[in-house]
Image (cartoon, rainbow, N blue to C red):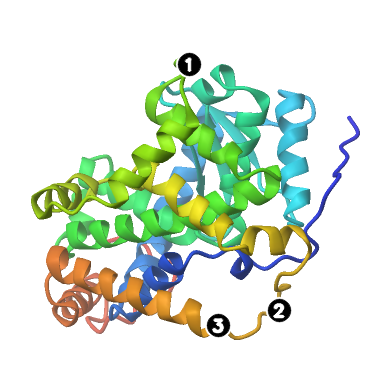
């Protein structure tokens, strides 16, 4: 089938739509001593390949001859973001309406069948555009580590690999990063669809189901009430409720997205005023101030859930040494598990 792209953000950089919380959380993760080394070691042990094989063997690969309408809209969304390559797309049988991007080096997108079958073509494209935003932002590396850690903690993978590793603290830190990364991908979906209300309405439906008579205006009011909650006990309860979620609450996502649109950034990008890949200018003082505020918040989160960051780094170092045949932590990439 012939696929036409009516609109394209030529060479758009992910920095064009990056949420300050995303940048802050990513830089905070980079600041945790040895965290990236630990993640690379987990991936080198081969479990990312195992995850890919499970998907390849137990899901349906979408393409021109397999659910062609969905494939066409997917390729169209990738073209709008001007991606150099279209990641493989798979449909996986599952009850929850969801999709995710995986793959430490070569990303793939997996969409649950309940989403594909139950939602409109426009809604499905909105979800796929969101995932392609993750691809352009290169979120898939940390997302893959998050999925692997979840499998470890659930007992799906050998727990012997985790001996001495502060896996729960690492998992909670990656979850907090994931919630921030979702805010960037929501913006990408709005850009692809050309209407920021599309992802907002989708989030309302994901939160409440396909109920007749739902009002987006009422949902926005609800989001404002959530944002303005000043009861300290309620905010404390909210912190612990969000702790194990990979996505922010729907009302917060809607509020964040609409505030971005109201700032004028969405219209500027639609008009073609945005940074190109490899030509990203220094961020504005306003953006850097927002990043600093979010990073301070993320650092407090790490202290509250994982303890002292330097102590966390020492634990990572001890685990790396224990996994190394030489006892120095200098195990070569791709070395087999012991």
Residue 29 image offset from top left, x and y in percent: 34, 72
Numbered mark located on residue 278 in the image: 2
Q: Which class describes the residues within 10 Å of circle 3: few (<14), some (14-19), or many (20+)?
A: few
- Give the residue pinned by disc 1: 213
Q: Which class describes the residues within 10 Å of circle 1: few (<14), some (14-19), or many (20+)?
A: few
The answer to whether marks 3 and 2 mark residues whose Cβ atoms lie closer than 8 Å is no
Q: CA distance from mark 2 to mark 1?
A: 46 Å
Of the pair 164 and 144, the residue shown nearer to us: 144
* Residue at image point 24% right, 47% down: 242
Q: Which circle's residue, 3 or 2, is located before the other in the chain?
A: 2
Q: How many marks?
A: 3
* Residue at image point 77% right, 42% down: 76
Q: CA distance from mark 1 to mark 3?
A: 42 Å
Of the pair 258 and 135, the residue shown nearer to us: 258
- The secondary structure type at the circle numbered 2 is loop
Q: Compared with residue 247, is residue 91 higher up or lower down, i.e. above or below?
A: above
- The secondary structure type at the circle numbered 1 is loop
Q: Quadrant of residue 61?
A: top right
* Residue at image point 34% right, 43% down: 249
- The secondary structure type at the circle numbered 3 is loop
Residue 140 image offset from top left, x and y in percent: 50, 56
Q: Compared with residue 325, is residue 153 higher up or lower down, i.e. above or below?
A: above
- Give the residue pinned by disc 3: 284
State whether residue 332 appears in this view: no
Task: Tell which tag, 1 or 3, sits nearer the viewer.
Answer: 1
């Amino acid at each position: 089938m012939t696929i036409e792209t009516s609109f394209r953000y030529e060479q758009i950089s992910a920095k064009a739509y990056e949420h300050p919380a995303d940048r802050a959380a990513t830089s905070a993760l980079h600041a945790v001593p040895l965290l990236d080394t630990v993640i690379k070691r987990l991936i080198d042990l081969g479990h990312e390949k195992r995850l890919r094989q499970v998907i390849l063997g137990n899901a349906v690969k979408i393409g021109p001859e397999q659910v062609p309408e969905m494939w066409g809209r997917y390729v169209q969304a990738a073209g709008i973001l001007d991606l150099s390559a279209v990641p493989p797309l798979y449909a996986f049988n599952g009850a929850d309406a969801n999709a995710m991007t995986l793959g430490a080096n070569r990303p793939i997108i997996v969409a649950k069948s309940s989403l594909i079958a139950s939602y409109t073509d426009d809604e499905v494209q909105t979800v796929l555009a969101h995932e392609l935003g993750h691809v352009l932002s290169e979120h898939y590396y940390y997302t893959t580590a998050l999925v692997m850690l979840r499998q470890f903690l659930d007992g799906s993978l050998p727990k012997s690999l985790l001996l001495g590793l502060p896996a729960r603290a690492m998992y909670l830190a990656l979850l907090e990063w994931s919630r921030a990364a979702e805010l960037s991908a929501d913006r990408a979906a709005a850009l692809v669809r050309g209407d920021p209300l599309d992802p907002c309405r989708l989030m309302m439906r994901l939160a409440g189901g396909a109920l007749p008579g739902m009002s987006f205006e009422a949902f926005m009011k609800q989001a404002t009430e959530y944002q303005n909650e000043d009861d300290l006990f309620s905010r404390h309860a909210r912190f612990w409720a969000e702790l194990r979620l990979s996505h922010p609450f729907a009302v917060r996502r809607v509020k964040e997205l609409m505030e971005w649109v109201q700032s004028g950034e969405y219209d500027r990008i639609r008009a073609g005023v945005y940074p190109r890949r490899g030509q990203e200018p220094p961020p504005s003082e306003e953006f850097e101030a927002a990043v600093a505020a979010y990073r301070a918040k993320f650092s407090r989160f790490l202290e509250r859930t994982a303890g002292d960051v330097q102590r966390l780094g020492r634990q990572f170092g001890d685990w790396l040494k224990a996994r190394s045949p030489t006892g120095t932590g200098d195990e070569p990439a791709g070395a087999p598990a012991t």
